[in-house]
Image (cartoon, coloured by chain):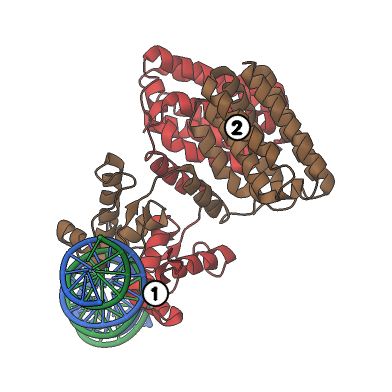
Chain colours: A brown, B red, C green, D blue
Amino acid sequence: MANGEKPASMILFEEMLDRIRTGQWPVGSRIPSERVLMAEFGHSRVTIREALSMLRALGILSISQGKASVVQKMDAKLLGRLFPLMLSLEGERTYQQIFEVRLSIESRTAYLAALNRTKQDIDELERVLAILKSHLAQNIEQSLESDLRFHIRIAKASGNPLFPLLLEALSGFVAYVQFLSCKGDQVRRERALHFHESIVQAIRDQDPERARVEMESHLRTSADRMLKSGLLKKNSQ
Amino acid sequence: MANGEKPASMILFEEMLDRIRTGQWPVGSRIPSERVLMAEFGHSRVTIREALSMLRALGILSISQGKASVVQKMDAKLLGRLFPLMLSLEGERTYQQIFEVRLSIESRTAYLAALNRTKQDIDELERVLAILKSHLAQNIEQSLESDLRFHIRIAKASGNPLFPLLLEALSGFVAYVQFLSCKGDQVRRERALHFHESIVQAIRDQDPERARVEMESHLRTSADRMLKSGLLKKNSQ
DNA sequence: TAGATAAACTGGTAATACCACTTATCTCCT
DNA sequence: AGGAGATAAGTGGTATTACCAGTTTATCTA
């Protein structure tokens, strides 16, 4: 016989999650202390703490000793952490696989961005582009981070919040590979910058088809470099 | 001053996760009892249980009273549960958003499936198609489930395991919407079936471009029906 | 009034006991 | 000897108590 009874800690977990969802516990606010929750929910402290641990595992709750626990913004960074974590449990992902997904998504984000971009989007993209340029000769980590921000900013300009979310989730994989592709090679980074500028130009001109083509060229060029480097089969995580 | 010290429960959580990752605790196996883990890790039962609760929250561990806890396969179904859960915390998702993501992904899976499909893929697709046909006049839930399976099977045929994973993750959203789109309208389901057959045919013929076009037509047609139904703005979750 | 001190919070861990449920074992009856 | 039921052992679930370790707040002192 299946045991349908859910443990109290599970119920509390869902109930607390619901409080966060409904705004009863707003993002950024400090939730009541464990002693208070004990009385409120009518359960012992261990049960309360187990429920809180679950929320913590999902990154929804920030808990640290001495301080009150605060509700975290459920942004894409969390997804970016959990996504690779989960995928790592069923086989390794290759760069080829990541690339294909990025291509399918980003060719679309570029297209939609050109269609839906606002003046504010353009300004933002220019800004990120400037940062990208300034980081060209600097350290690699910053340069890669800026590059990722650039692509995510385009996804944001698409008007569909799911796209930047997905990209951020995938970024848990791409980081290392991007690092390899740009490592110590300033010429490559300059070439990538040129592509970035072309993409922004197409988005500014509201030319979806050109934006798509430029984005695909950019990604394909990066992928080809990986191939030549013989690092294609390298696992990304 | 930031408190860099991680609580023991957190450390144990990561350590247990690592044991699962490395295969020390294989998927499907039963992990030691809490009393044993107490001795092994040298911590009290509450600490052990808090770590276990975190694994449970992620769906990695199946825990039920009386029975030993077993390591769960970290498949896409879990992602499908967690994904919408997380997204639900930052604004609602509309059908339009889901549709755009599906279009970007599935136009690519159809294309790749036509390129990389094996004979076994074709057989499987035929089988799913037959099931789909047999469910045409039957209850809606089964029909929708089969439809989802069909699309995921195509993604699988692409050869890139990330695609079916993403689709399954998105399915947490589409279910309700698909339900609406097909609800009580057998004519629509028959038309969808026709599209499905065309897609399979293109994949069988190894005609990537045609497969892509057919898939896009299929999805766009479904989306248009949603528009006409006035349900476009309806939240999917 | 400013700084140091102390009290009152917060979460983290441990130990113990008991309950609820499942599984394995044993015993007894046929 | 074999099967069915009772029994015992093992599992997770919860509660209680106590104390530790940080943080914040209030208080007192210089």
What kind of residue is marked 1? Ser
Does B172 appear above or below A47?
A: above
Residue at 38%, 30% (x, y): give it: B236
Q: Position of residue B198 (x, y in %)?
A: 61, 20
Residue A93 image point, x, y percent: 65, 50
- Disc 2 residue type (three-letter): Arg
Quarter of the figure that contains the N terminus of chain B: bottom left
Q: Position of residue B2 (x, y in %)?
A: 43, 63
Residue A216 in sight from this viewpoint: yes
Quarter of the image where one finds residue A218: top right
State which quarter of the image contains the C terminus of chain B.
top left
Q: Classify residue B211 by image quadrant.
A: top right
Label placed on residue B33: 1
Quarter occupied by residue B201: top right
Residue nearest the viewer, comparing A66 with A34: A66
Q: Residues at badges 1 and 2 in contact (C-beta under 8 Å)?
A: no
Of all residues, the one furthest to the top in this rendering is B228
Residue in the image at 75% along x and 46% along y? A182
Give the structural element (helix, strand or loop) at label 1: loop
